[in-house]
Image: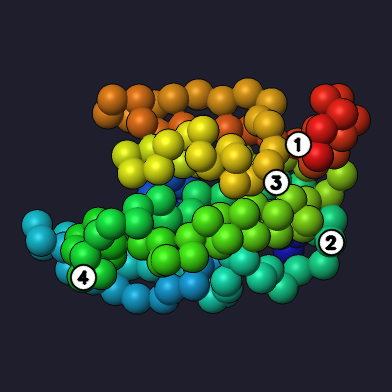
Amino acid sequence: MIEKIILDPCCGSKMMWYDKNNPAVVFGDVREEDHTLCDGRVLQIRPDIQMDFTKLLYKDNTFYHVVFDPPHMVKLGKKSWMAKKYGVLNYHWRNDIRDGFNECMRVLKPFGTLIFKWNESQVNEAEILRIIEHKPLYGHRSGKGGKTIWMSFMKSSQTLINGEK
């Protein structure tokens, strides 16, 4: 049996994953649901375990790698196809993003890596970086208009390398 060494705490329909059943990954999401999108495609959100990314049930220093791709839209109709596909942030989303990021860092092993994916179509990168209070090691913009940002973090790197929080 392969050890679960990677965590995706808001996997949704696992769109970014090449292997949607990777045995080394714990796929988590607060939702477990099926939808038929406006074009007739079926969207399945089937995590291994239902979890709230702001209160992870794992011990400190559990995973080598965490992928944090939380919902990034605050202004969507709850029943829109975008909401079904990506989820929607609620009115206290700033606290949720900060708490979720901190939880992801907490469950990382020392020098483990966290990949944080954010789309700034409604909330810009500068505001997110103020909320999470960590500086990424490096990142990359992608997607239509370059609004999707992939950022890489390493547990302990900020204090050991940059002398930051």
> Are the residues at dot 2 and dot 3 in contact (C-beta closer than 8 Å)?
no
Label 4 packing within 10 angstroms: few (<14), some (14-19), many (20+)? few
Q: Label 2: state its secondary structure.
A: loop
Q: CA distance from mark 2 to mark 3?
A: 13 Å
Between marks 3 and 1, how big is the CA–CA gap? 9 Å
Quick one: label 4 or label 1, which is nearer the N terminus? 4
Residue 119, position as x, y percentages in the image: 40, 40
Q: Can residue 18 be seen? A: no
Identified by mark 2, the residue type is Asp
Q: N-terminal of the two: label 4 or label 2?
A: 2
Q: Which residue is mark 2?
A: 60
Query: What colouring does the structure picture have?
Result: rainbow
Image quarter where the N terminus lies is bottom right
Disc 4/disc 2 C-alpha distance (Å): 36 Å
Q: Is residue 65 left or right of residue 54?
A: right
Residue drawn at x 78%, y 56% as measured from the top left? 106
- Name the residue tied to disc 3: 65
Q: Give the number of the mark in front: 3 or 1.
A: 1
Secondary structure of residue under mark 1: strand
Disc with the residue nearer the chain's start (3 vs 4): 3
The residue to which callout 4 is attached is: 79
Earlier-in-chain disc, 2 versus 1: 2
Which of the image's four quarters has the C terminus?
Answer: top right
Q: Residue at x 43, y 73 (%)?
A: 31
Looking at the image, residue 76 lies above or below residue 114: below
Rendered image: mark on residue 154: 1
Callout 2 environment at 10 Å: few (<14), some (14 to 19), or many (20+)? some
Residue 147 at x, y = what percent? 36, 31
Q: CA distance from mark 4 to mark 1?
A: 36 Å
